[in-house]
Image: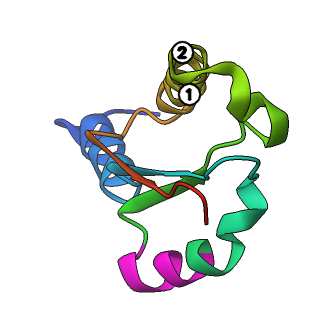
Amino acid sequence: SIAIGNSESSVATAHVENEPDHLLVLVHGIMGSPSDWIYFEAELKKRLGRNFLIYASSANTFSKTFGGIDVAGKRLAEEVKQVVEKTESLRKISFLAHSLG
């Protein structure tokens, strides 16, 4: 095949433009799990569209929430880092969390 001009980079740019650029991390409360977000996650996906990657955290499920904020924070940070590394198009990160319910 013959590359004419800058067609390869145009294809790459178009691919990135169709990918999400904003990661929204959903963090459940004490003794919770990602399933706490099932309904809300579905609604957010419908309303926010494909520019958002909506991710319900599972790093601190159930009794892991009692490990303390420092430990839970490190687990969450590592989990988010792994998600970001898998999705090159991301440019922003937001967190949505709840506490007891």
Q: Which residue is mark 2?
A: 74
Provide the secondary structure element on which disc 1 rests: helix
Which sits in the foreground, 15 or 55? 55
Residue 17, position as x, y percentages in the image: 30, 55
| Tag 2–tag 1 contact (CB < 8 Å) | yes
Residue 75, position as x, y percentages in the image: 61, 20
Residue 56, position as x, y percentages in the image: 62, 52
Q: Is residue 45 magenta?
A: yes
What's the amino acid at mark 1? Leu
Which sits in the foreground, 40 or 7? 40
Which sits in the foreground, 51 or 62? 62
Boundaries of the magenta span: 42-49
Residue 34 sits in quarter: bottom right
The structure residue drawn at horizontal position 69% and vertical position 20%, both measured from the top left corner, is 67
The structure residue drawn at horizontal position 71% and vertical position 29%, both measured from the top left corner, is 66
Q: Which residue is mark 1?
A: 76
Residue lying at the far left of the rendered structure: 5
Q: Looking at the picture, does residue 39 appear above or below residue 50?
A: below
Residue 55, position as x, y percentages in the image: 57, 52
Q: Main secondary structure of the magenta part?
A: helix
What's the amino acid at mark 2? Lys
